[in-house]
Every structure is written in C-alpha cells, then in structure tokens.
Image (cartoon, rainbow, N blue to C red):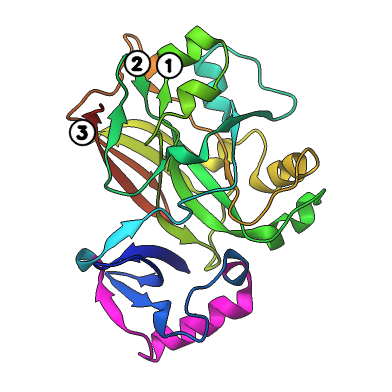
Amino acid sequence: MQFVRYSSGGGGHWGVLDGDTVHSLADAPVRSPSLQDVTTESYRDHVGRLADEGALTSHAVDDVRLLAPVPEPGKIVCVGMNYRDHAEEQDEEIPEKPLLFGKAPTAVTNPSSPIRIPPGIEEVDYEVELGVVIGREAHRVDAADAADHIAGYTVVDDVSGRDAQFDDGQFLRGKSYDTFAPMGPTLTKGDGFDPNATDVSLRVNGETKQSSNTEEFVFDVYDLVEYISHAMTLRPGDVISTGTPGGVGIFRDPPELLEAGDDVEAEIDGIGTLSNPVVDGT
C-alpha cells in the first residue's frame, strides 16, 4: 500500500495512492493516522477496504501537491558505503560493520520542491537512497523483528555538498544544508514490497547516473535496524537512509555535479519517482 501526505489548498493530509487517484483519509475513522497506525497491517487492510468501497473522498493526484511523508524526522541516520558497487568506485574495502553518520532533520524538503545550492558551495552531488521510516519505537531490536517497527519505505535523495564534506573531514555540515534531503513521493508498506530486492536509479536531466538494486546492500534493512537500535533508540518518525549505489557525481571522471537548472529524478521501484529541480540558493 502507498500512503501519501498531500496538500489540496490547505495543510497537510494523509491519503492512500491508487494509480492516479489519492483517497483522502480525512474520511476514515482515524482522520490523521500516526506512523504506528500505518505500521499495523490491520489498519492498512481497513483503509484499503474503505478505498475499494468508494467510502473515501478522492482526488486526482495531479490536482494535489505531494509532500514529504515525514516533514520533521526526529533524526535521520545515514549509512555510508552500504552498496558494494559504491565501495568499489571509491577503491574502498567493504565495511565490516555499518558506517553511520547524521543528517539534520531540517534538510527535508518535498517532492517537486527545489534543491537550493547554498552560497559558497560549488560541489553539490546527488545520492538516491532507500529511506526506512520508523513507526514503532525500536530499542535493541533483533533483525528478525525489525519489520514490526517499520512504518514503510520512501525515496531519499541524500544531496551532499562535497566541498564542505571534504573541507570538514566529516559529513554533518555537507549533508545538512536546507533542502538537501528531498523525500517522497510515497510511504510504501506491504503488497509484496521487498526493501532488500528492489531497483533503484537516479537521473539528471533524463540521463541515468545511478542504476542498481538493493540486493547490492552490504547490510540489509533489518540488519541496519538491529545495529542502529542497539546504539540508539529509534522512535516513530525517525528515518534511516540506507546508503547509495555507485555512480555518484564526485567519483565520475571528470566529476559530474549538480548545477542550477538541472532536474533530478530519484526512483525506487514500488515506491515511485522523487523529482526536484536544482536552483541557486540565497
């Protein structure tokens, strides 16, 4: 099932996306579901029946504005070098344990909203990533139980200011500029979606730059939830950004970095395409 947050002239609302139609959950018994509701199979089954029965107000998806499914994450935990092909393009050894770093929650922006190049930053890069949204508190969770704590999956573009990253010798500033975490367009859970075996790709101006499959993960989604939750409690609304495949701009020869006027499309099969234009920021 694909949940969306959307605006139709007012604030944000939850809905269920079915093809080109958004079924509003404002008509459902739980008008504004929590991420814990979305995590629950019985809730998903219930709203699915309401949509099938025509009991929910519907909008054409082109008539609404899709929003980031988690506009204010408690924290964004990112995983470095979690695709074998990305480690290979950097001539790095495959890590023996997950490499974690943080990205500021204020970096989140919506589908179709611009990625703004900050003044003084010249090396802005793209990174398509599978985002894992926590729906139920996870503290020292085993991998076998991890799925019970996940509300769903979304697309994250882990935009990176490489010059800031390399100047600082660490990730936080370069990863955390405003608009550097586009997220969406849906929050997907169930319906046979396998987060550890799905195609991921990214295009700039229609040209494919990254193309891989999460089967390339070094550490799969459930192993990551186990590892991270043993280091810190994961709470509803936290997001794990699971790493990017090979093909990022900075490691191309010559480098191919983002410029104002570019259009970026990050796509994950079963979730959708996250599109954002690139503009000069102020």
Asked which quadrant contains residue 13, the reply is bottom left
Do the numbered discs 1 and 2 sit on residues whose CB atoms are within 8 Å?
yes
CA gap between label 1 and label 2 equals: 5 Å
Label 2 amino acid?
Glu
Nearer-N-terminus badge (1/3): 1
Graded by Cα atoms within 10 Å as few (under 14), some (14 to 19) or many (20 or more), the crowding at tag 1 reads: many
Give the magenta range: 38-61
Q: Of the residues shown, which amino acid type is indicated by label 3?
A: Asn
Q: Residue at x 44, y 47 (%)?
A: 155
The image position of residue 138, as x and y in percent, is 74, 53
Q: Where in the figure is residue 205, as x and y percent of width and height? A: 20, 33
Residue at (49% x, 8% y) in the render: 167
- Circle 2 is placed at which residue position? 123
Eye-nearest disc, 3 or 2: 2
Question: What type is the residue that disc 1 sits on?
Answer: Arg
Label 3, on which residue? 205
Residue sitting at x 63%, y 72%: 40
Residue 3 appears in the rendering: yes
Residue bearing the label numbered 1 = 162
Q: CA distance from mark 3 to mark 2?
A: 17 Å
